[in-house]
Image: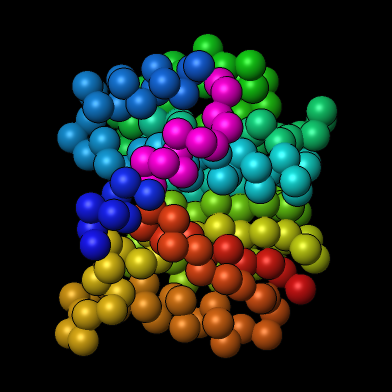
Amino acid sequence: MQDILSLLNDYCASHSTLKDPLLDKIERQTHLSTTAPRMLSGQLQGSLLSMISKIKSPKYILEIGTFTGYSAICLAEGLTSDGKLITIEYDEEHSHLAKTFFDESQYKDKIELKTGDAKDIILKLDYLFDLVFIDADKEAYSQYFDMVINKCNKGTLILADNVLWSGKILDAKKDKKTQQLDDFNKKIANDPRVENVILPIRDGINLIRVV
């Protein structure tokens, strides 16, 4: 079964549009320069992020968890002409690597990279966001959601990554991190301020719409 899922994922990726050649460079360099390259969004998820951003055409995007910049560039593809993406990364080495790629990107003037604790940085942001991507420390997903929900317009899309956690979300006895993700998914499903659907793409994306 796992082999079939892997083959289907490869098929979907190879038949999905992702045009920016810089993304290939980011993927190669991430595998060479980091100890956890699987944290990279990758082609299929990147295509989805790009498509959602283009459909939404956001003016302001917030990304919590930059890693090496792959997802930020995908998200930036849908920004309005006067739009801006704010991306937050805690790790200084990852932030430095992402900055080098942003400087090469056609979106370099639209991407603002902030390094530090997202919980401190978000409090100081004075924007109403149209699109939010949460992909940082999993234990803090509920806290991030609570911090950004009041900084969102009606109709804003919030995407939370890794919500299936390699299938561990189905375990009867969950470790602490998995339980916190499960609690987050339940919280979202029962929050009257939003509607959502969980997409089983890669490690799972919770697609949330502010109503």
Q: In percent of the image, x 67 and y 59: which residue is there?
A: 157
Answer with left or right where residue 77 lies relative to residue 74.
right
What colouring style does the render use? Answer: rainbow
Relative to 174, say whether 21 is above or below: above
The answer to which of 5 and 132 lies nearer the viewer is 5
Q: Quadrant of residue 110?
A: top right
Q: In percent of the image, x 44 and y 76: which residue is there?
A: 184
The answer to which of 36 and 10 lies nearer the viewer is 10
x and y percentages locating residue 6 in the rendered image: 29, 49
x and y percentages locating residue 41 in the rendered image: 41, 41
The answer to which of 4 and 191 lies nearer the viewer is 4
x and y percentages locating residue 198 in the rendered image: 51, 69
Answer with left or right where residue 94 lies relative to residue 143.
left
Q: In percent of the image, x 55 and y 29: which residue is there?
A: 18
Q: Is residue 121 visible?
A: no
Q: Which stretch appears magenta?
A: 9-20
Q: Is residue 188 magenta?
A: no
Q: In percent of the image, x 22 and y 39: which residue is there?
A: 36
Q: Is residue 2 visible?
A: yes
Q: Is residue 11 magenta?
A: yes
Relative to 204, say whether 179 is above or below: below
Where, quadrant-wise, is the N terminus in this rendering?
bottom left
Where, quadrant-wise, is the C terminus in this rendering?
bottom right
x and y percentages locating residue 7 in the rendered image: 32, 46
Answer with left or right where residue 189 lies relative to residue 23.
right
